[in-house]
Image: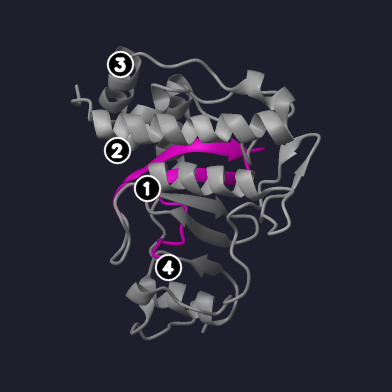
């Protein structure tokens, strides 16, 4: 069992309170989709099932809202955030289908694909669907995923939150931590509909899942791949 850090709990609870306040302003019907808290035993069971400790701020978040319920409008830019059971089910299922690819897991090949614009990477993340060191926390129609990256490449932060869209071959680090993700979302909700604008797009179904996807720099490698000699896998 992980000890509770009361300062982290307070920060996360405050971030959720800000989110709820502005959802009440811009999308009040979504508030009922926020799930009640998980208890400590359920959170500990996630760690036991996955064999990895969860970041303290994500544990704190589950103690505020244990994911979100299916249905529209969604309170987050996804169909749902998984609850504790869903996190285990989705992550173990991912692990069960994860097979190493000696060609496309090669950093030289990844460098080539980025240089050619075949994949787009924004931030220090390994742009593969490897499940190693990753915990799935949310989905949009099974096509877009949010995961906690517990073992990022150099330059990344353990526990960073990544948006992966394999179909569009895009990988975006949304925030260096779950707490920072909540604060980013809270700020963009606060700015929604104001003269300064917000990157959020919201309709009757909820915020669009493109939130957090960076624009431009399609051919820019993350720093950890910068000095890698590219290798064309088809040459």
Dot 3 alpha-carbon crowd within 10 angstroms: few under 14, some 14 to 19, many 20 or more: some
38 vs 217, left or right, is left
Q: In the image, residue 110 lies at what x, y percent?
A: 45, 72
Q: Quickly name the residue at label 2.
A: 55
Numbered disc 1: secondary structure: loop
Front residue of 146 and 233: 146
Query: Residue at left 36%, top 36%?
Result: 11
Dot 4 alpha-carbon crowd within 10 angstroms: few under 14, some 14 to 19, many 20 or more: some
Query: Residue at left 69%, top 26%?
Result: 30
Q: Are marks 3 and 1 in contact (CB under 8 Å)?
A: no
Q: Is residue 208 visible?
A: yes
Q: Is residue 144 magenta?
A: yes
Q: Going from the N terminus, do you reach mark 3 or mark 2 first? A: 3
67 vs 167, left or right, is left
Q: Is residue 98 magenta?
A: no
Q: Is residue 92 visible?
A: no
Of circles 4 and 2, which is in front? Answer: 2
Front residue of 9 and 3: 9
Dot 2 alpha-carbon crowd within 10 angstroms: few under 14, some 14 to 19, many 20 or more: some
Q: In the image, residue 181 lies at what x, y percent?
A: 46, 46
Q: Are marks 4 and 2 in contact (CB under 8 Å)?
A: no
The range drawn in magenta is 124-151
- Spatial separation of the CA atoms under disc 4 and disc 3: 42 Å
Query: Residue at left 31%, top 62%?
Result: 153
Q: Quickly name the residue at label 1.
A: 177
């Amino acid at each position: 069992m992980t000890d509770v850090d009361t300062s982290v709990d307070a920060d996360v609870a405050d971030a959720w309170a800000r989110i709820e306040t502005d959802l009440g302003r811009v999308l009040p019907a979504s508030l009922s989709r926020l799930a009640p808290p998980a208890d400590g035993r359920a959170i500990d069971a996630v760690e036991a099932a996955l064999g990895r400790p969860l970041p303290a701020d994500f544990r704190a978040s589950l103690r505020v809202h244990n994911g979100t319920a299916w249905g529209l409008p969604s309170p987050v830019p996804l169909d749902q955030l998984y609850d504790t059971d869903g996190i285990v089910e989705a992550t173990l299922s991912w692990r069960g289908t994860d097979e190493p690819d000696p060609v496309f897991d090669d950093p030289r090949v990844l460098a080539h694909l980025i240089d050619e614009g075949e994949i787009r990477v924004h931030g220090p993340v390994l742009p593969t669907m490897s499940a190693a060191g990753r915990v799935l926390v949310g989905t949009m129609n099974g096509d877009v995923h949010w995961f906690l990256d517990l073992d990022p490449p150099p330059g990344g932060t353990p526990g960073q939150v990544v948006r992966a869209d394999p179909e569009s071959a895009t990988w975006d680090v949304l925030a260096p931590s779950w707490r920072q993700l909540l604060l980013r979302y809270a700020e963009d909700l606060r700015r929604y509909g104001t003269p300064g604008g917000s990157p959020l797009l919201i309709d009757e179904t909820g915020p669009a899942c493109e939130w957090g996807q960076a624009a431009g720099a399609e051919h820019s490698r993350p720093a950890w791949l910068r000095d890698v000699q590219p290798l064309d896998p088809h040459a």
